[in-house]
Image (tube, rainbow, N blue to C red):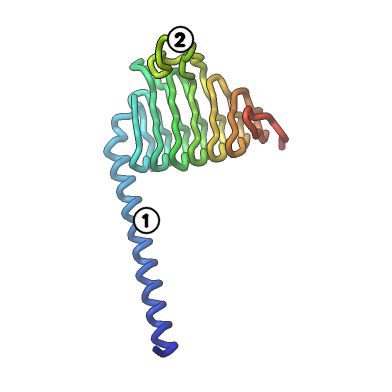
């Protein structure tokens, strides 16, 4: 086989590959947009240009408010417990949740504008009760319900856990694999389990 024919075949293969990748991307975007348009009316509010990528798990969407230009990545779980009329989970404009994240609100989780949440984050305003030795933990309900706030422009790394009653400040950064059980100030970097502030800027 001549060098020229090998170059031609390599170029053809690269072209087909690029076209397949582009078609896949278009298909995924179309699926996500169509799904978002279909489910958006069930939410307390659902802003323009916001996208939820399926597959996704949703619960209590009538108590969930999605701002404009929000992206919720595939494999995530958004839930608001209970059936009260007030919004329990709010995602601010431009917020990006990369995927495989859990946001579970019984009372109040408020996520500000342009917050970035990496994969596998877990954010909850409540804990499981576990002190009754006669019942399984899953049968004991929830306890320690307290509002959670993620202020504008903060960033949570991969696998971050945020517990009840926590405020993560404006522009703050929480490092990967951290467990946040107390407040993180504005423009601070926190890491560890439990997370502690290591610098401010």
Residue 152 coordinates in the image, percent (x, y): 56, 33
Is residue 171 found left or right of 62 in the rendered image?
right
Q: Which image quarter is the C terminus in? A: top right
Q: Residue at x 43, y 39 (%)?
A: 100
Is residue 114 found left or right of 192 in the rendered image?
left
Residue 174: quadrant of the picture: top right
Residue 74 coordinates in the image, percent (x, y): 39, 42
Q: Label 1 neighbourhood size at 10 Å, few (<14), some (14-19), many (20+)?
A: few
Q: Is residue 52 above or below residue 14?
A: above
Give the residue at mark 2. Answer: 132
Q: Nearer the viewer, residue 37 or 145?
A: 145
Residue 36 coordinates in the image, percent (x, y): 32, 40
Q: Is residue 45 above or below residue 24?
A: above
Residue 57: quadrant of the picture: top left
Residue 40 coordinates in the image, percent (x, y): 31, 35
Q: Residue at x 36, y 43 (%)?
A: 53
Give the residue at mark 1. Answer: 25
Q: How many marks?
A: 2
- Residue placed furthest toward the front: 134
For the residues marked 1 and 2, what is the alpha-carbon distance in whole angstroms?
Answer: 49 Å
């Amino acid at each position: 086989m001549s060098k020229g024919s090998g170059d031609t075949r390599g170029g053809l293969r690269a072209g087909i590959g690029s076209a397949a990748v582009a078609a896949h991307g278009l298909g995924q975007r179309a699926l996500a947009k169509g799904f978002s348009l279909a489910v958006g009316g069930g939410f307390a509010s659902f802003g323009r240009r916001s996208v939820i990528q399926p597959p996704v798990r949703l619960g209590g969407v009538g108590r969930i408010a999605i701002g404009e230009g929000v992206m919720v990545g595939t494999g995530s779980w958004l839930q608001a417990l209970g059936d009260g009329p007030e919004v329990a989970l709010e995602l601010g404009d431009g917020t990006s949740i990369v995927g495989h994240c859990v946001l579970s609100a019984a009372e109040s989780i408020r996520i500000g504008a342009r917050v970035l949440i990496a994969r596998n984050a877990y954010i909850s305003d409540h804990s499981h009760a576990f002190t009754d030795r006669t019942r399984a933990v899953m049968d004991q309900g929830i306890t320690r319900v307290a509002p959670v706030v993620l202020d504008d422009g903060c960033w949570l790394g991969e696998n971050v856990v945020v517990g009840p009653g926590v405020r993560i400040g404006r522009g703050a950064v929480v490092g990967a694999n951290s467990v946040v059980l107390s407040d993180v100030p504005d423009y601070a970097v926190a890491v560890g389990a439990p997370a502690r502030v290591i610098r401010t800027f």
